[in-house]
Amino acid sequence: MTSDWWKDAVVYQIYPRSFQDSNGDGIGDLRGIINRLDYIRDLGANVIWLCPIYASPNADNGYDISDYRAIHPDFGTMADFDELLSQMHFRGMRLVMDLVVNHSSDEHRWFQSARQSAESRYHDFYIWRRGRGDAPPNNWGSWFGGPAWEYVPEMDEYYLHIFHRKQPDLNWNNPELRREIYDMMCWWLNKGVDGFRMDVINLISKPDELPDGPGGDLSPFCVNGPHVHEYLREMNSEVLSKYDMMTVGECPNLTVDAALDYAGAGRGELNMVFHFEHTGLTDGRFGKWTDARTPLPALKRVFEKWQTGLYGRAWNSLFWGNHDQPRAVSKFGCELPEYRALSAKMLCTCLYFMQGTPYIYQGDELGMTNAGFSDIGQYRDVESLNAYRDLVGSGALDKRTMLRYLACTSRDNARTPMQWSSGACAGFTSGDPWISPGHSWRAVNAERELAEEDSVYNFYRRALRLRKESRTVREGTFRLLWPDDERIFAYEREYEGERLTILCNFSSETVPLSEPDPALGECLICNYFGEGEPEVLRPWEARVVRSEVQIS
Ligand code: GLC
Ligand code: CA
């Protein structure tokens, strides 16, 4: 029943709140997405991953679900959803939904009942413990700040929440909970959806003993917990194996070996995983809050490890950013006006000629930049606001420094309105947007980029078409060139006598190639107009060169 169509897919990720508003309430909606389907198809994407659109009190913008089978009225109705799905299928596109089942909202009816009585059928759907005296059951800290436990006086017990206190963790040890989840998944699949992106799926299994963690860190116990593979295999046999669908699991703190356990061919679990090794290289003393730049040799090593480590054994997910990351061009490229578009095209080339399924986060195909917010009042994201409160409140960081860090790494950098035009509010809404547009929208918008042959959008189209036609991109081996070079990211792909050499300059300087011969051959795509010299890469230049190799 299942096929490998997801290996040839190009996935476009939509953060619905910020994509396109159709009714002037300042919030993106399903009708807005329907109106933009041709734009996505014409880019060359054939799958949409839709971030949560379910009923939710929005403590974490929809990642706190209060009814898994209802559409949030902000986004429209179930009829709108059905129309979106059929319009997509009509265009030969497929829809992947976000599955958020590590936790629900505290406003879900299960939790409402669970918190009232230990007799409730739903009490054990969550993770409850007695306190230690007046203190929580253990020292775990929530990933969104503060303790990971919340006290419920009616029960005289605490419940566990790895994320916000309005996101209580579900108890996967309970078979009735698992049954409910599988039924819900089948309900969406029977409607016709084509897959799931599984939110923090490697956190779902917790040990029975919940001991203190080093420095309050819960990761050693909750990441890849004791029964996670048992549950995913059960989910696979109860649900996934019965449909022609794709799955990708979001897995923080993942090693290559662990990825093979989740998504190795023949494991009977997931098709793909997202790891965050390449996005986390700048983490430091204050975790993700920093203005550091990613060191290129380390970045290359990470890709080399994943490209070779999964080769022939599992399938990579290729992404620079998503709704939790800063903008790719700001983080890995260069925002300066003269280099923004060049570096966005370079990043496209560097990533999407690797092996795996491309994921494009909305707006990256335009080279959208970070928001450029300078006031804490402009931020909406709960993680950013909590971190500001905690780090500035405790005196660990001064306001100016923290604002600088937020401007580099806050999730809101990727959540500003999609930039459709140079008209009011970037063409996103005719009303007041729920979050201000980023600073770059007058210069960077879809209307302009569709019209300009040389735009980032049109470069993406060409690159995606090329990769689609290439067996070497799909199947070829990966070899990193010049691993220690601090400015050039270059690699070779080889398959059945064809070699593609991908040459990318991650700097604003002109860089001579130390051994120019890999640059000789037919140039398939380049982000500059006009031939350069083979032995030199111009600032932020990217080139894909094709040559033939002797098969010995
Ligand atoms: C995932 C989501 C993120 C959310 C978190 C909790 O990491 O991508 O947006 O806040 O899980 O659901
Ligand atoms: Ca709306």
Image: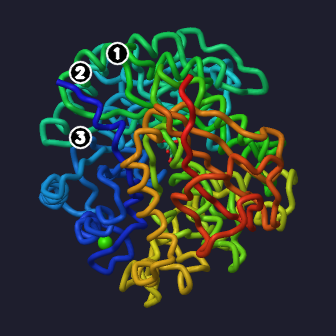
Mark linked to residue 268: 1
Mark linked to residue 326: none
Q: Which residue shows up at 69% across the image and 42% down it?
A: 280
Q: Are marks 3 and 1 in contact (CB under 8 Å)?
A: no
Q: Are marks 1 and 2 in contact (CB under 8 Å)?
A: yes
Q: Which residue shows up at 31% across the image and 21% down it?
A: 177
Q: Quadrant of residue 2?
A: top left
Front-most of residues 325 and 392: 325
Q: Position of residue 169 (x, y in %)?
A: 46, 30
Front-most of residues 44 and 443: 44
Front-most of residues 478 and 140: 478
Left or right of 153 on screen, residue 527: right
Q: Residue furthest bottom?
A: 423
For marks 3 and 1, give the CA distance: 18 Å
Q: Quadrant of residue 74?
A: bottom left
Q: In this rendering, does residue 120 appear at all?
A: no
- Please tell me which of labels 3 and 2 falls first in the chain: 3
Q: Is residue 229 positioned above or below 159 on the image?
A: above
For marks 1 and 2, give the CA distance: 8 Å
Q: In this rendering, does residue 311 appear at all?
A: yes
Mark linked to residue 194: 3
Q: Which residue is mark 2?
A: 241
